[in-house]
Image (cartoon, rainbow, N blue to C red):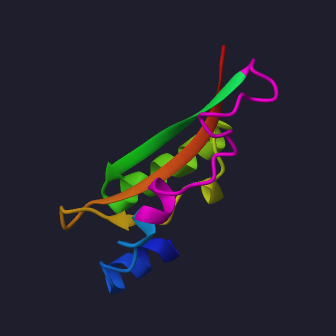
Amino acid sequence: MAQVENFVENPNFALSDLHQYLGGENLNTPPVNQPAANPSPKREPIKHLLIASPKVVISTIHHLQVIGYASTGDWSPLLPTANPEEVMSILIRQILIQ
């Protein structure tokens, strides 16, 4: 809930955080020109984006933890959107591609 309080106090607090979660993340994947040490299985990033009211986003994050998909600490802080009563949170996971 501290994320909601921070968002309410200063709606612009996390604008620069969006770049932290979407741009320049370290995905631990080899550069395109270099072959992978183990070409199979291949890991690829998937980005989950929740956009809704703060209450719904937080509730969904907690539900995904309860079912064992992702811990609450894996998600970004609540980030403001262009809509005043809406926030977003981002989760980047690595999945195996076969």
Q: Which of 24 and 67 is in front in this view?
A: 24
Query: Could you say which quadrant of the image residue 17 lies in?
Result: bottom left
Q: Is residue 9 left or right of residue 30?
A: left
What type of secondary structure mainly makes up the magenta span?
loop
Quadrant of the image for the C terminus?
top right
Q: Residue at x 69, y 33 (%)?
A: 34
Identify the residue at image location x=51%, y=77%. Answer: 2
* Residue 52 in the figure: left or right of residue 25: left
Q: Which residue lies furthest to the top in this view?
A: 98
Residue at the extreme front of the image, as rendered: 33
From this viewpoint, which residue is outermost toward the left? Answer: 83
33 in magenta: yes
Measured as percent of width and height from the top left, residue 79 is found at 38, 65
Q: Identify whether 62 is placed above or below 42.
A: below
Q: Is residue 78 visible?
A: no
Q: Position of residue 18 (x, y in %)?
A: 41, 63
Q: Can residue 6 be seen in this view?
A: yes
Q: Quadrant of residue 9?
A: bottom left
Q: Which residue is drawn at 46% across and 41% down?
A: 48
Residue 68 lies in what quarter of the image? top right
The answer to whether residue 13 is above or below residue 69 is below
Q: Which of 64 and 94 is in front in this view?
A: 94
- The residue nearer to you, when weighing 52 against 35, is 35
Q: What's the magenta region?
A: 19-41
